[in-house]
Amino acid sequence: MATIPPNEKVILVGHSLGGLNIALAMDNFPERVAVGVFLTAFVPDIEHRPSYVVEQYSERTLAAGWLDTEFLPCGNKTSMLFGPKFLSTKLYQLSSTEDLELPKTLLRPGSLFMEDLSQQKNFSEQGYGSVPHAFIVCTENIGIPLNFQLWMIQNAGINDVIEIKGANHMAMLCKPQELCDSLLQIAAKYD
C-alpha cells in the first residue's frame, strides 16, 4: 500500500475474514483507497474493538453449528481447522464437487484471531471511517448467514450494498459472472 503512487487509489476487496485485513489497510492508508469492498466478509465498525464483529459471530453461532471444525490450543491462541462436513454444508454447498475437493487438499489450520483483535484499538474515523465501504451480500451463505451479513451492514453503516442471489460463501466459484458484474459496478461508481 505504501508504494502506491500518491495520485492513484486502489479498490480493496476482502472475502470472509479478509474483511478485517482490508479494514486495517483502509485505516492505515485511507488516502490510497477508493473503496473497501466486503465480499460476504467480516466488517468491523469504529465504535468497538476490531474483535467485536467476530465475537458477535461466535456468540450467535451454536457449538453444533461448527460441525466437524476442530478448535485447538496453539500457544496462547486458538487455531481452527474446518472439517469436510463444515466445508461442504456451510461454505461450498452450491459449488461443484471439483470446487469443493481442491480446498480440501489445501486446507491448513487457521484462526479467528480473537486474541490479537481484542488487544487492538478501534479503527479510526479519520482512517477506516473516512473510506467508502461497499458490501456484497451472498444470499445463500450458510457460513456467514444472511441475517448476520445484514446485521454487519447496519452495524457498520454501509449504504452501498449489492446482493448476489443464490450465491453461497464462495461466490467466486458458484456465481463468478455475477460477482464480476458486481465488482465492476462498484468500480465504476468509485472510478
Image (spheres, rainbow, N blue to C red):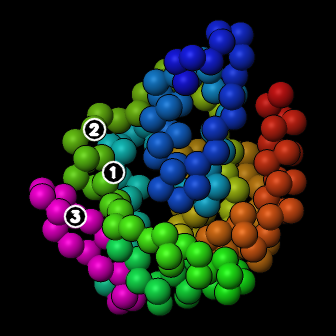
Task: Tell me what residue is drawn at x 53 percent, y 59 percent.
Answer: 16
Depicted 190 relative to depicted 14: above or below: above
Q: Which residues are magenta?
A: 64-80
Label 1: few (<14), some or many (≥20) within 10 Å?
many
Between discs 3 and 2, the one toward the N terminus: 3
Residue 153 drawn at (x, y percent): 59, 54
Say if residue 112 shows up in the picture: yes
Identify the mark at residue 78; answer none if there is no mark.
Answer: 3
Q: Please give the label number shown on residue 120.
A: 2
The answer, for residue 94, to whether it is visible in the render is no
Which of the marked residues, 3 or 1, is nearer the chain's N terminus? 1
Using the image, determine if residue 164 lies above or below residue 92.
above
x then y, percent, for residue 56: 37, 63
Labels 1 and 2 touching (C-beta < 8 A): yes
Q: Which residue is mark 1?
A: 51
Name the side, left or right, on which 56 lies relative to 177: left
Return the x and y of residue 191 as percentages of the image width and height: 83, 28
Residue sitting at x 84%, y 35%: 189
| Image point (56%, 86%), residue name | 88
